[in-house]
Amino acid sequence: MNSKLILVLRILLALILIVFGANKFFGFMPDPKMPELAGNFMAAMMATGYLFKLVGATEVVVGLLLLFNKWVPLALVIIAPVAVNMIFFHLFLNPAGIGPAAVVTIIVIILMYKKWNKYKTLF
């Protein structure tokens, strides 16, 4: 795969994670309209007092690691469960909003594939 494409995908993913992660702390983007079950799930995450912010902090940290090209394989392993949860959240609770989650998940998969030699020892 073209290294410039990988660079663009890594930076794009980094910016997406940083912006949406920071939004979980500062709320600078309006909340989208969601079906009732999706809204209940998000409200439950916020009601814990920590889970929503933990996901946001994880997204920001991983985004910064990707942006500065530091520990990229580790950053991708850390964000993979978040990407999987995004897909399942939208598949089961909010199918109309699956587009951005699919983009994030596809980018994570492509970047992990590109770094596959770093993961071989795990299997």
Image (cartoon, rainbow, N blue to C red):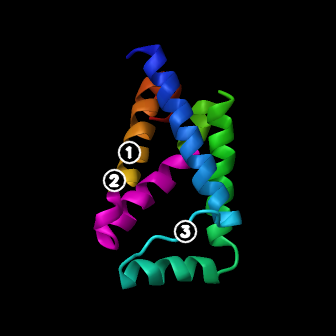
Disc 3: which residue:
30
Q: From the image, which quarter does the C terminus lie in?
A: top left
Q: Secondary structure at mark 1?
A: helix
Give the label, 1 or 3, closer to the camera: 3
Residue visible at 42% across and 37% down in the picture: 107
Residue visible at 55% across and 82% down in the picture: 44
Q: Point out residue 45 in the picture as x, y percentages from the top left corner.
A: 57, 77
Q: Point out residue 2 in the picture as x, y percentages from the top left corner.
A: 41, 14
Sooner in the amino-acid sequence: mark 1 or mark 3:
3
Q: Is residue 11 left or right of residue 120?
A: right
Sooner in the amino-acid sequence: mark 3 or mark 2:
3
Q: Tag 2: residue type?
A: Gly
Residue toward you, 41 or 114: 41
Disc 2: which residue:
99
**Separation of residues labelled 3 and 2 (CA atoms):** 18 Å
Q: Tag 1: residue type?
A: Val
Residue toward you, 62 or 13: 13
Q: Secondary structure at mark 2?
A: helix
- Within the image, what quadrant is residue 30 found in? bottom right
Q: Which residues are magenta?
A: 78-98
